[in-house]
Amino acid sequence: MVLKTFGWSFAVTALGLVAAVLYGGWTAFGIVAILSILEISLSFDNAVVNAGILKKMNAFWQKIFLTIGILIAVFGMRLVFPVLIVAVGAGIGPIEAVDLALNDKDLYQQLVTDAHPSIAAFGGMFLLMIFLDFIFEDRDIKWLGWLERPLAKLGKVDMLSVCIALIVLLASSLTFAKSAHQHGGGHADKAETVLLSGVAGLITYLIVGGLSGYFENKLEEEEEREHEQEEKARKSGKKVSAVAIGGKAAFFMFLYLEVLDASFSFDGVIGAFAITNDIVLMALGLGVGAMYVRSLTVYLVRQGTLDDYVYLEHGAHYAIGALSIILLITIQYEIPELITGSIGVLLIGWSFWSSVQRNRAIAAREGALGEKAEPHSDAGV
């Protein structure tokens, strides 16, 4: 099972490391290995969230996610995206940007760094909306019940998550503008760009998430109409499997996954410049890491891990919330990648341990009662 799921990742790792040695020797080998680990650590929460969405999709769209999706993730976000940043930011063509990346790496890194506030605003707002919509939804199973219960009640207020996100964005842009003014106005012109980028991230979330939700609801309506036929099939002894999402619903969920992956990759792409400004090594290292994130997503789906460890999804969304705040803070201040990656790993690790504790408690109740115990809806901390 492990070899089948991670086989392509192992193969890509071997090819990537060999290519690194051929390109720049053993120093390049070490850089690619470090970048791969960086990408995996920063994107583990991405895999957990992706798995929660991917398990709803049928086999065809899962294959699309693993084929076309990985091309978008590896080549689009880890190779093309940094080049486009430079091209748009510097007002030059894509070919010139590639030439700059290969022949003037210091200037290339500087241009990408200059574009970071806009990137962070877009990605931060997109991820913040994911987090807010999650914690404001009333769920049967709660992890941090003392926090999630009152937030679920607040979530009944219409558009609350959008209002909070806009307030956070406005505060971030005003703080950035004030700081720029105090330091001579060198970045004052970027304050407006930060605001517009954040609004663009919010709009992107609302459009993509809204369309995927719309078509998912349409599919559920069709399933309800087929309910009588399914009941007849059950009575006749035929096996009835859960209907996986396909068609338009799956397409927009796939689109949602790709935008989500792009938002997660922002910190990895920017953080990679702390290790190297060589675009070739960056693409190799981040590409290898992205493959493992994809494989891990599929592994979680096929193993049913999210069903067995019910708090993992909670931990991943809290990690998303932390990452969104970190991205918005990095508009003005620099935060080490070690902190960014560690927070996500700690939150997911905590949620995993809480899930294990919950499963043990249920097993103990089953043993005491001599029958299967029903899990409590608020079996959280």
Image (cartoon, grey):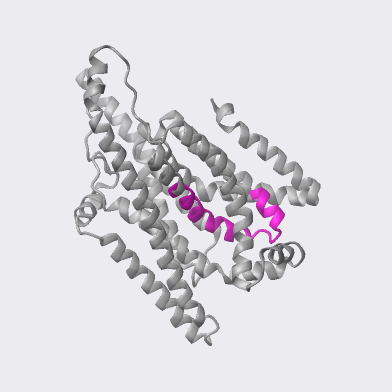
Q: In this view, does 224 lie to the left or right of 350?
A: left
- Residue extending furthest toward the top: 237
**Dominant SS type (magenta):** helix
Residue sitting nearer the eye, 75 or 323: 75
In the picture, measured across the screen, residue 49 lies left or right of residue 110, that is: left
On whether residue 278 falls in the magenta region, the answer is: yes
Residues drawn in magenta = 256-285
- Determine the image quadrant of residue 85: bottom right
Query: Can you tell which quarter of the image residue 234 is in?
Result: top left
Horizontal side of residue 237 vs 131, given as left or right: left
Judge by depth and name the residue closer to the eye, 105 or 217.
Answer: 217
Does residue 223 lie above or below 148 as drawn?
A: above
Question: Magenta stretch: residue 134 in it?
Answer: no
Q: Which of 175 and 354 is in front in this view?
A: 175
Residue 5 visible in the shown view: yes
Residue at image coords 45%, 44%: 254
**In the picture, which quadrant includes the C terminus?**
top left
> In this image, 111 relative to 29: left or right?
left
Q: Is residue 372 visible?
A: no
At 44% from the left and 33% from the top, the residue drawn is: 301
Q: In this view, does 103 lie above or below 28?
A: below
* Residue 291 % position (x, y): 59, 41
- Label count reads 0
Say which of 62 and 37 sits in front. Answer: 62
Which residue is located at x 71 percent, y 68 percent? 106
Residue 326 image point, x, y percent: 45, 62
Q: Position of residue 130 (x, y in %)?
A: 37, 54
